[in-house]
């Protein structure tokens, strides 16, 4: 292809991985890990509050669910805002919101205040995740896009491991141990400033707003990192004064259009089922172990070991996603998750519990990595963040329901019924994955 006629998106697609890509991945990934740490910590806080505040299972289920109500709203609104005002601004704002709210949660003196602050935390957390994956996918080289997004999602494991370590070493220290654990959440507030100053804005977003000089500078920074002299794109021009409305705003394609509707429906089913199973299992995991007769420290120890298996799950998914493709990798890991969930429900000894839990961590988190890689590739630039955000928002409905139904399922059939339901949910998600198009190696669609 003639270098003079390549678009900026094509120039980014053809680059090798550079240190600039690494900085983008690290900058987005640290925010991702901090988000995961917050979600993970609440599972340990729930177990501690069951002991120190003598909360019932119903009250605990609402502590686990209320944050996901905020996440459902945040995911939808965050995606829409990212398509309107930019990925970077929304990313930084969401970190600020949830960091401050998490720090304030440490001071909560009642269940009502705790739940209110957890809702605000969810608003920030829900908006951040689809925005970060969209930003990374839009800068990633075409041949490495899947692996880069899975690598971003792998930071979730880092955050959960941090949460498990804090849960194991800090939460059991005393009645206020859970408060000190949540106080760590103030860290994202400072990091939001780093994000705002250090990460690039989406080139595709800048172009859609007529900010061509900024878009060209962003592309050249990545080309310079690869020591490639990039020719200006043919439509390069000085910035106009202020944001320019999208020329295609009036005809922006709906995510439910005949072309996009099937993939949107399948994506929503996957998001719903994987959220139901993941959050139902992992938010309650320390409490479920506590209910099986293990003390607080031992249940936290087992949860830490189970959490460590997330890392190789991401690593294998990152390798397979560019070998097998997105659809096959996602379906395989979802089927593995279904089998592992069934085995966990039948486990009746510490060895079986840990082994099945590690298998569930491995396959479930590998599936999450593949899912985040697939989402942004399904939509054109003008609805990419809002399309992925809408799917995430629909999935959050399941994450709200999941902690609430666990006590009811436990009463009706114990761990076997709980994890049997999750196994079926994973199976349905695997079937839906087969309805998605395979987009490995293809450029992101502009329209």
Image (cartoon, helix red, strand yellow):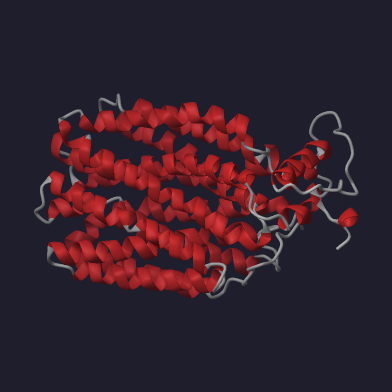
The residue at the far front in this view is 227
Q: Is residue 126 left or right of residue 339?
A: right
**Residue 97 percent coordinates (x, y):** 48, 31
Q: How many marks?
A: 0
Answer with left or right where residue 110 lies relative to residue 3: left
Q: Quadrant of the C terminus?
A: bottom right
**Left or right: 177, with 8 as reference point:** left
For image coordinates 42% across by 49% down, the residue present is: 156
Residue 162's spot in the image, x, y percent? Answer: 33, 42
Residue 355, quarter of picture: bottom left
Looking at the image, residue 33 sits to the left or right of residue 193; the answer is: left
Compared to residue 120, the image places residue 255 above or below, namely below
Q: Write down the quadrant of residue 376 in the picture.
A: bottom right
Judge whether 427 appears above or below 57 on screen: below
On the image, which quarter does residue 346 sit in? bottom left
Inspect this view and state whether residue 59 appears.
no
Point out residue 294 in the picture as x, y percentages from the top left corner: 11, 52
Q: Is residue 154 visible?
A: yes
Compared with residue 4, is residue 32 higher up or lower down, i.e. above or below? above
- Name the residue: 32% across, 58% down: 309
Q: Residue at x 56, y 74 (%)?
A: 435
Taking the spot 23% from the left edge, 58% from the top edge, the residue there is 408
Q: Quadrant of the N terminus?
A: bottom right
């Amino acid at each position: 292809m003639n270098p003079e006629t390549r678009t900026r998106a094509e120039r980014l697609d053809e680059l090798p991985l550079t240190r600039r890509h690494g900085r983008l991945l690290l900058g987005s990934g640290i925010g991702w890990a901090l988000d995961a740490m917050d979600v993970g910590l609440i599972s340990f806080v729930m177990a501690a509050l069951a002991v120190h505040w003598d909360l019932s299972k119903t009250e605990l289920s609402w502590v686990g669910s209320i944050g996901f109500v905020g996440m459902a709203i945040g995911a939808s609104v965050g995606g829409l805002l990212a398509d309107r005002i930019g990925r970077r601004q929304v990313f930084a704002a969401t970190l600020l919101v949830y960091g401050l709210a998490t720090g304030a949660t440490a001071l909560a003196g009642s269940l009502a205040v705790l739940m209110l602050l957890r809702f605000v935390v969810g608003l920030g957390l829900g908006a951040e995740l689809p925005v970060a994956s969209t930003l990374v996918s839009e800068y990633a080289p075409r041949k490495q896009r899947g692996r880069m997004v899975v690598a971003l999602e792998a930071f979730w494991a880092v955050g959960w491991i941090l949460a498990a370590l804090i849960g194991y070493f800090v939460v059991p220290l005393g009645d206020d141990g859970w408060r000190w654990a949540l106080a760590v959440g103030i860290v994202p507030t400072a990091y939001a400033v780093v994000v705002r100053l250090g990460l690039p804005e989406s080139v595709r977003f800048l172009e859609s707003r007529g900010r061509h000089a900024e878009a060209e500078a962003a592309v050249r920074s990545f080309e310079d990192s690869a020591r490639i002299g990039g020719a200006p794109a043919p439509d390069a021009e000085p910035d106009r004064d202020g944001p320019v409305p999208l020329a295609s705003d009036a005809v922006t394609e709906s995510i439910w259009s005949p072309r996009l509707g099937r993939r949107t429906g399948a994506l929503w089913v996957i998001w719903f089922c994987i959220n139901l199973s993941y959050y139902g299992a992992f938010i309650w995991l320390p409490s479920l172990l506590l209910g099986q007769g293990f003390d607080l420290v031992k249940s936290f120890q087992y949860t830490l070991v189970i959490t460590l298996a997330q890392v190789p799950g991401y690593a294998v998914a990152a390798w397979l996603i560019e070998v097998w493709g997105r659809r096959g990798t996602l379906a395989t890991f979802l089927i593995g998750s279904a089998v592992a969930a069934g085995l966990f429900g039948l486990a009746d000894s510490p060895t079986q519990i840990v082994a099945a839990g590690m298998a569930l961590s491995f396959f479930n988190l590998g599936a999450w990595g593949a899912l985040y890689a697939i989402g942004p590739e399904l939509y054109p630039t003008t609805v990419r963040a809002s399309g992925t955000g809408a799917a995430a928002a629909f999935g959050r409905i399941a994450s709200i329901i999941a902690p609430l139904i666990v006590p009811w399922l436990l009463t009706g059939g114990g761990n076997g019924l709980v994890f049997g339901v999750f196994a079926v949910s994973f199976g349905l998600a695997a079937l839906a994955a087969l309805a998605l198009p395979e987009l490995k190696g293809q450029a992101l669609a502009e329209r």
